[in-house]
Image (cartoon, rainbow, N blue to C red):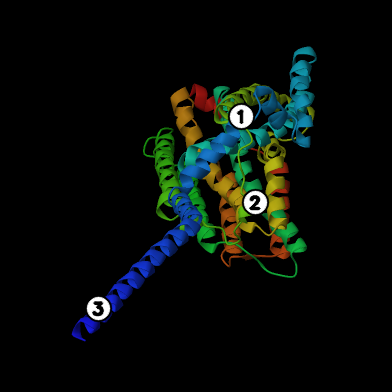
Amino acid sequence: MDNTNNNTELTHSQSHVEMASLMQERAVLEVERETRENSPRQKHAFENRSLSQDGADNINESLCQKGNNIGGFLGSIKIVIFSAKLNILMIFGPIAIVVDKASGNQSWVFLLSLLGTIPLAERLGFVTEQLAFYTGPTIGALLNATFGNATELIISIFALRNGMIRVVQQSLLGSILSNMLLVLGCAFFCGGLVNYKKAQVFSKAVASVNSGLLLMAVMGLLFPAVLHATHTELHFGKSELALSRFSSCVMLIAYAAYLYFQLRSQQNLYAPLNQVDSDDEEVPEITKWKSVIWLSILTAWISVLSECLVDAITGASTEMKMPVAFISVIVLPIVGNAAEHAGAVMFAMRDKLDLSLGVAIGSSTQIAMFGVPFCVVVGWIMGQPMDLNFQLFETATLIITVLVVAFMLQEGTSNYFKGLMLMLCYVIVAASFFVHVDPAPLRDENQKHG
C-alpha cells in the first residue's frame, strides 16, 4: 500500500516538473517572439536617439551634401546672375564705363553707375548669406558685419583715397538716416496697412540695445563737433583728430562686444517673437567655395563702379545743379540700398517685424558703430585726416533722428501712423539738405595741405 502511494506521489511530482519545464520553454519562446517583433522598433528608437544627440552635425552634413550636389560653376551663374529680375540693371555698369571713356558726361556716368550698383549690392548680400550657411552663426555674423554694408564702405574707401572726406561723412550719415527714417517708416506703414486688424509687435529688448548703441555713436560724433565749434581744443587742429581716432577704436570695441553679446551671451534675447516655421528653413543654393569666388567677383566689380561713381559726383553735382550734400546724404543711400529697403518692407507685410528691424535699425547700428569708425581707421592708415566731426548741422540731424526713432520703438508695437510720421520726418530732412550749403566745402583741401 505504501509503495503504491509512493509511486503515485513520484508520478505526480514528475508530471509537475514536466509541466513546469513546458511552461518555461513556452515562456522562452514567447520572449523570443516578442524580441523579434520589437527589434525593428528598438532599432528605430535607437536611430532617433542618435539623431537627437547629433542633430546639428547631421543637419550641417545634409546642407553640405546638398551644396555639393549643386551643379558646377555654370549652375552658380544661373543662380547668382539670372535668378532675380533686378539683375537686369547690371547691364548699366558696363554702359557707365563706356560712357565715361567715350563722352565723359559726368551726370550720365553717375546715374548709370548708381543704377549698376543696385543689383550688385543685393547679390553681395545674397552670396554672403550663402557663405554664412557653412561658417556657423558667429563667423556668419562677422561676415554680415563686414559685407552687409560693403557697397557703402567701398565707395567710402575710394572717396577717402581721393581726399573727399565730406563725401564719406555725408554718405555714411545718409545711410543711417535713410535706414532709420525712410526704411523703418515704409516698413511700419506698409505692414500696418496690410495687418491693420492686429497690432504688430517686435522685441523691445533688441530695439533697446540698438537704440543704446546708436546713442553711443551720437556721443562719439557729438564731442568732436562741439570741440571744433567752440574752439576749445588743447592743440588746435590736432586734438579733434586725435579724439576722433581714439573714440573710433572704442566704438569698434563696443561693436565687437555687441556681437559677442548677441551671439554668445544672450542668444535667447534675440529670438524673434514671430518664429519662422520649420518648413521655411532655408538651405544653401551654392557651395562654400563658389560663394567665396562670387564674393570676390562682386566685390571687385563694385569697386570698379564705385571708382566711377566717386569720380563723377562733383561733375554730376554741377551739371544737375544739385548740392553735393544732397547727393551724398539722400540720393546715394536711397538708390544704393533700394533692394535692401524693399526686403524690409516685404518682411513687415508678412508680419515679421523683427526681421524688418534687423534690416533697418540693425543696418543703421552697423554703419554707425562699425562703418564710421572703420573709415576713420582706414583714413588714419591712408594718411587722410578723416575724423568724427560731421559738422553741427549733420550732427544735430543725427541726434534728433535717433531720439525720434528711439521714442517710436519704446513700446514694442507699430502701426501705419508711426510709419507715416517717420517718412514725413525723412521728407523734412531731405528738404533741409537740398537747401543746405556745406560750411566747409574746402575743408578737405585745407586739412590735406594744412
Q: Within 10 Å of the Cα at label 3, are there few (<14), some (14-19), or many (20+) other Cα atoms?
A: few
Q: Earlier in the sequence, mark 2 or mark 3?
A: 3
Q: Earlier in the sequence, mark 3 or mark 1?
A: 3
Displayed quadrant of residue 255: top left
Which residue is tagged 2? 280
Instruction: Tell me the number on the disc at residue 7.
Output: 3
**Viewer can see residue 35:** yes
Q: Amino acid at mark 2?
A: Asp
Q: Secondary structure at mark 2?
A: helix
Q: Amino acid at mark 3?
A: Asn
Residue 271 percent across, percent down from the top left: 52, 57
Residue extending farthest to the left is: 2
Q: Relative to 108, does residue 224 appear above or below in the rendering?
A: below
Separation of disc 2 and disc 3 at Cα? 81 Å
Residue 52 vs residue 409: left or right?
A: left
Q: State which mark lies toward you, 1 or 2.
A: 2
Q: Relative to 274, does residue 246 appear above or below in the rendering?
A: above
Which residue is tagged 1? 155
Residue 150 percent across, percent down from the top left: 58, 33
